[in-house]
Amino acid sequence: MATLSSWWQECLTTIGRSLAYVLLCVVLIFIGLIKGIFVGIAAAIVIFVGHSSVTIFLWPVHVYMTYNTIVRSKKLGLVLKVLSLFVLPVPLLLWPVLVAVGSVLVGLGYGFGTPLAATFEAVGEHRDSKFYHAFADGTLSTLIGSCTVVRDFTDLCLHSYCDYLDDFRTSEPKDGKPLDIKLLELPACLAVAVLGLIADTPLITLVALAKSPFLLFKGWGRLLHDVIGRHGACLEAACVPFAGLALLLWPAVVVVSVLLAIVSSPVLGLFGAVVVYQEDSLRCGLAYIVSIVAMFDEYTNDVLNLSEGSCLPRPRYRKGIPKSEAMPPGSYVSPLSPDNATFRPTAVPQLTASRSLRHQLQEVKIVQIWDDMFRNINLRGRYLVEAGVLNTADLDGWLRGGKSPKWKVVACGLPAYCTLHTLLESAKANCAGILLSDGTDLTMANRPQERMLDWFFEPLLTLKEQLRLANLTEVEEHYLEKLVLMVGDTQRMLDWDNGGVEPVNDIRRGELQALSRRLQGIATAISRLPTYRRHYKRFIKNLLLYALDRFNTDISSSSSDESLRFDRTPESSGSGSLQNIAVENNIV
């Protein structure tokens, strides 16, 4: 009897705890929704006003620079230049509108989702004042984050876009032949572009709308399976409320996915003109218009784990590709690639079995790579300051926004120099991937599944293998350091005595110069990414303060020696020097 009573008591206790847990989740969701509504509106206003102001202010500059780049670029032929000049007003006029709409959507999404997630995090373990943090967390920090988003967007418009235009204007065409289009091909390209826009846009939209119920219910089914079976992201009890929140917000994810498909459909249709130009065939362009709908249908079937293939016709639109080509399961042929390269779909929500939380923790996060890169820049930069290779003029000149070639040592040379050392250490360690400073081997298996990272990771792996196979001597490594850091400044290369000597062999010298150019190109491309300039600027400011502190220490020690020699007080020369240098460099 006592056993039955204790069993009933245990059952009632379990039911009571479950009800309390559910009630807590409901209360937290309600608090998070209230916070998300108010903070989301405020964040949307901040981002909308900031982005719109930057866009309107820089729009005349962007128009002038874009037209100037098209006219002066050596990469484009005469016909393509004239065609671009006529077409450019469309994207230039749409740009402010797209920025305004995108700013509102980003502001609402960021301002609504961040406080909602912070509400659940506030009641986690080892958190004090949970009641206060449930209301306060995610409010002020989200507004500050909105200002940071505006700042990153400003850097993107003011620096990254302008740098890209400068490179495009000054770079030489591949094989010395500019990209151009024949006048006879122009009518066919325009006709296919119009037909693709008219046909593919509604057809792809219909496919996306038809597949949206599958995405909705399959997503709900996967989330419920994870909650009930405690799999995937719901392996830990603390993650269950987030799964419930995901169930509520999954329809919004479906709507966004459909909208992205609708927005991308005109681009896919217009690409038929490029196919006509590449294949020099009107028939290939028309075949592409039909084939792209079937390819999109196959892509969605693969994402949703539906039947493979498509019932829609898929004619061959590339002359050099056989009709039936074996592809790995779950792969997709990219229509935007000239060689029809295959890749696995990762752009939309995947409905495959979720990995466990413990497995996800083994994956290297992109934030970890970002932090490791800047930590490496800080350490290598301090070494170069101590060696006298970098001085306050270099650091301050770049911080002031100078785009003179002599500041390229900081803008491009320093990041490329740090990347070189990372690749050299990885090559010497014979690791499969890239060795981070904490000993982590970043490989294709544990790298973050970010499409942006793919643009740089594989080229860096290729460079690492080239460095390993080159079998550089110590003297050649030091000479490569000079080439990479000084970015073509021969005088500074001669001034820096690090033991590196130019190879006598012309072939070897050309190999080292090619490696340095690739490293500098990758560093320049990374510098144009969002958030990079903000982080890099903070580290360069700290590096400048470190250089000033060392300069002041050297002057103080020399002043002390002089005071002992001439029997003067030590206070006669120390403090004024640092103040003058700091004022000169805008530190104080």
Image: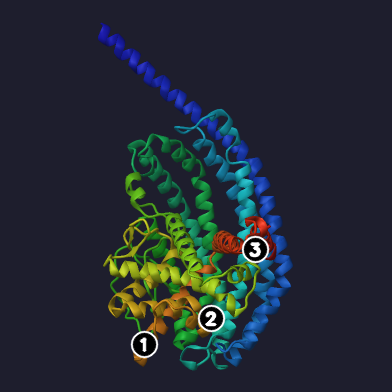
Residue type for callout 1: Pro
Q: Which residue is mark 1?
A: 503
Q: Which mark is residue 154?
A: 3
Q: Which residue is mark 2?
A: 192
- The quadrant the C terminus occupies is bottom right
Q: Quadrant of residue 49?
A: bottom right
Q: Considering only order in the chain, which callout, 3 or 1, is on the residue closer to the N terminus? A: 3
Q: Residues under labels 1 and 3: Cα distance?
A: 44 Å
Residue type for callout 3: Thr
C-beta proximity under 8 Å, tags 1 and 3: no
Q: Is residue 393 visible?
A: yes
Indicate left or right for 446 with 529 as reference: left
- The quadrant the N terminus occupies is top left
Closer-to-camera residue (520/98): 520
Counting other residues with Cα less than 10 Å from the Cα at mark 3, is it few (<14), some (14-19), or many (20 or more)? some
Q: Is residue 105 visible?
A: no
Q: Residues under labels 2 and 3: Cα distance?
A: 37 Å
Rendered view: 126 above or below 276: above
The residue at 35%/84% (across/down) is: 320
The residue at 62%/74% (across/down) is: 162
Q: Residues under labels 1 and 2: Cα distance?
A: 54 Å
Q: Position of residue 2 (x, y in %)?
A: 27, 7
Closer-to-camera residue (394/55): 394
Q: Position of residue 328 (x, y in %)?
A: 29, 67
Closer-to-camera residue (471/7): 471
What kind of element bears circle 3? helix
C-beta proximity under 8 Å, tags 1 and 2: no
Q: Considering only order in the chain, which callout, 3 or 2, is on the residue closer to the N terminus? A: 3
Counting other residues with Cα less than 10 Å from the Cα at mark 2, is it few (<14), some (14-19), or many (20 or more)? many
Residue type for callout 2: Val
